[in-house]
């Protein structure tokens, strides 16, 4: 088949943009915010693309969506095609401003609380690079299908093959809460913790159990006092709002501690948690931009 005849099978561009944004973010709602449209508009455009392709691209489970195998395969091509089209548009308009795109796939809470406040520094060093930040809790293999240059995950010791990686940021977890929940002058005993709601996130399973062992508390966590959230940034915000105690990772809550929106009401050494590591697909180590980015991560964490 020649190129002219294959172009007759191009997918609808609006539907393609909606699908790619939803695949990157893992959410129709977040895709809608990025594109400046409604959730319903994204959902309809994805449906248009699925009908055009004759295959489901997302599994819909309640209010959540998840890429199917076909969706994951197509997402990588869609991202690459839209990136190429964007660069072609830059050239056509004569700007030549963007030399390349650097796609960073990072955990949502890390991206919001640590990376974004620092990212302008790296951007100032590379003004011709378009930084694309994608948040995801997907395993690396699934995230790779959607395409990334660098991923940031908490390294748990189970690293899939095919990646270079290195730890760059270590966190200590300490129980923190709003001063509205516990007065700063009132020091708690370990046993007192059981009287307050303990906030936990599905993305950090077993965190309180590990901390109780670390602190020497016997009996484990009483399920009756646990309040669960699907993402850690929600648990942190709930703590700021006075809904309970959360295990706060010190590098990610520095501003809240400094401004006393969060306090540590108990004197127990922090628990050293799994470090944040960068992951780069093998074969990319000679890319000077990626090398500079991982060096910048290490310098930023050390500073």
Image (spheres, rainbow, N blue to C red):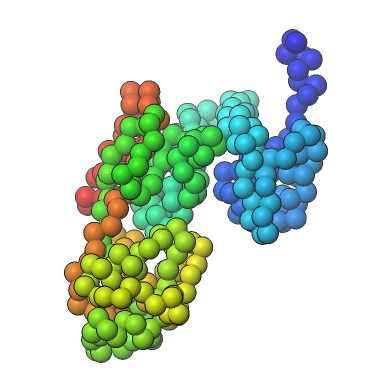
At which x and y percent is residue 222? 39, 77
Task: Indicate the quadrant where residue 218 lies.
Answer: bottom left
Query: Please, is residue 289 above or below residue 142 in the view?
Result: above
Asked if residue 126 lies left or right of residue 48, the reply is: left
Considering depth in this image, is 176 or 115 the residue closer to the camera? 176
Query: Please, is residue 155 above or below residue 73 in the view?
Result: below
Identify which residue is drawn at 76% across, 33% down: 53
Task: Indicate the quadrant where residue 69 lies.
Answer: top right
At which x and y percent is residue 58? 67, 44
Query: Please, is residue 299 above or below residue 37 in the view?
Result: above
Identify which residue is drawn at 66% across, 55% down: 61
Asked if residue 42 lies left or right of residue 23, the reply is: right
Residue 248 is at least partly visible in this image:
no
At which x and y percent is residue 298? 26, 44
Q: Quadrant of the N terminus?
A: top right
Identify which residue is drawn at 38% across, 83% down: 196
Asked if residue 16 lies left or right of residue 73, the reply is: right
Asked if residue 230 lies left or right of residue 288, the reply is: right
Identify which residue is drawn at 67% across, 59% down: 63
At which x and y percent is residue 138? 49, 46
């Amino acid at each position: 088949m020649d190129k002219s005849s294959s172009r007759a099978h191009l997918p609808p561009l609006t539907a393609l943009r909606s699908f790619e944004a939803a695949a990157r973010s893992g959410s129709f709602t977040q895709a809608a915010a990025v594109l400046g449209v409604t959730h319903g508009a994204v959902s309809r455009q994805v449906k248009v693309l699925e009908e055009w392709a004759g295959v489901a691209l997302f599994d819909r489970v309640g209010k959540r969506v998840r890429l199917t195998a076909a969706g994951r395969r197509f997402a990588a091509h869609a991202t690459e095609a839209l990136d190429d089209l964007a660069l072609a548009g830059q050239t056509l308009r004569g700007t030549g401003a963007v030399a390349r795109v650097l796609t960073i796939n990072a955990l949502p809470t890390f991206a919001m609380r640590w990376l974004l406040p620092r990212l302008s520094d790296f951007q100032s060093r590379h003004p011709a690079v378009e930084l694309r930040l994608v948040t995801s809790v997907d395993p690396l293999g699934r995230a790779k299908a959607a395409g990334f240059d660098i991923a940031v995950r908490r390294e748990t010791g189970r690293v899939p093959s095919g990646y270079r990686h290195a730890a760059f940021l270590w966190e200590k977890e300490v129980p923190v809460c709003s001063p509205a929940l516990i007065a700063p002058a009132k020091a708690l005993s370990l046993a007192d913790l059981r009287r307050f709601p303990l906030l936990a996130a599905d993305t950090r399973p077993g965190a309180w159990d590990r901390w109780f062992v670390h602190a020497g508390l016997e009996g484990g966590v009483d399920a009756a006092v646990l309040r669960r959230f699907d993402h850690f940034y929600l648990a942190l915000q709930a703590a700021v709002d006075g809904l309970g105690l959360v295990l706060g990772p010190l590098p990610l809550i520095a501003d809240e501690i400094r401004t006393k929106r969060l306090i540590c009401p108990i004197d127990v050494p922090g628990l050293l948690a799994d470090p944040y590591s960068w992951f780069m697909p093998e074969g990319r180590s000679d890319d000077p931009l990626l090398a500079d980015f991982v060096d910048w991560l290490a310098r930023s964490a050390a500073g």
